[in-house]
Image (cartoon, grey):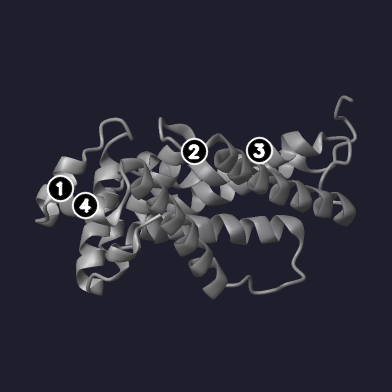
Amino acid sequence: MPKETFFNLPAEKRDAILAIAIDEFADHDYKSASISRIVRQAGIAKGSFYQYFDDKKDLYLHLVDLVTQEKMRVLGNNPPPDPDMGMFAYVRWLLRAGLDFEFSNPRLAEIAYRSMYGDAPLPAEVLAQIKGGVSGYFAQLVQQGVQQGVVDPALDPEVAAFVFNAVLLSLGDYVLQRLRIPPERLRDGDLEPLATPEAQRIFDEVMTVLERGLGPSVSRKP
């Protein structure tokens, strides 16, 4: 994590360094990301960088932590409209909220994707904790759905949780590619492309696939 000298910098300078680092790690895999490019664009000496962070890995782990904190902050500020809503209604809200975050913060979302599935040096125990926590969260949702009678109890709950997790992680990227929406538009605050009937149709069909695939079925083979 950052050294005290980094936090002693003026907020404007800290934010500028982090913004440049976010772009660097969003545009490149971990191995290709360059501290030299970051310090050059930030207008600081390379020696100064090592007064702020131990190394590239230290900076990267800090960015991953920032992504997590920001997403939790956004979701915390936008709670579901009905705390007693059904499981699929809640998942629909969760996917929508997750999409809104990714669409509004595409650079942070790209770092999150790379941290989970790229060549990033996340410690094995940290990566396992992240994936395990997400899987455990969706497993609880699946169990809730079974109790509500909207999820087939014959399904393997771990498989169902995996499906939810995979969809949540990749839906935003899929919508951008499918609709050919430049991420720059969303980063600049233009969310109009997401309000189109086509964008809503994709979202609704994803939810339909989830509900039909995971819902009770008398014809499902054991």
Specify the amino acid type for callout 4. Answer: Phe
Left or right of 51? Residue 30 is right
Residue beneath disc 3: 163
**CA neighbours of label 4 inside 10 A, class few (<14), some (14 to 19), many (20+):** many
Give the label, 2 or 1, closer to the camera: 1
Q: Residue at x 18, y 54 (%)?
A: 48
Specify the amino acid type for callout 1. Answer: Lys
Residue beneath disc 2: 116
Q: Earlier in the sequence, mark 4 or mark 3?
A: 4
Q: Earlier in the sequence, mark 3 or mark 1?
A: 1
Residue beneath disc 4: 49
Specify the amino acid type for callout 2. Answer: Met
How far separated are the C-alphas under marks 4 and 2?
26 Å
Classify mark 2: helix, strand or loop: helix
221 relative to 92, above or below:
above
Q: Earlier in the sequence, mark 3 or mark 2?
A: 2
Measured from the top left, where is residue 217 in percent x and y? 85, 37
Specify the amino acid type for callout 3. Answer: Val
Q: Which quadrant of the figure has residue 132? A: top right
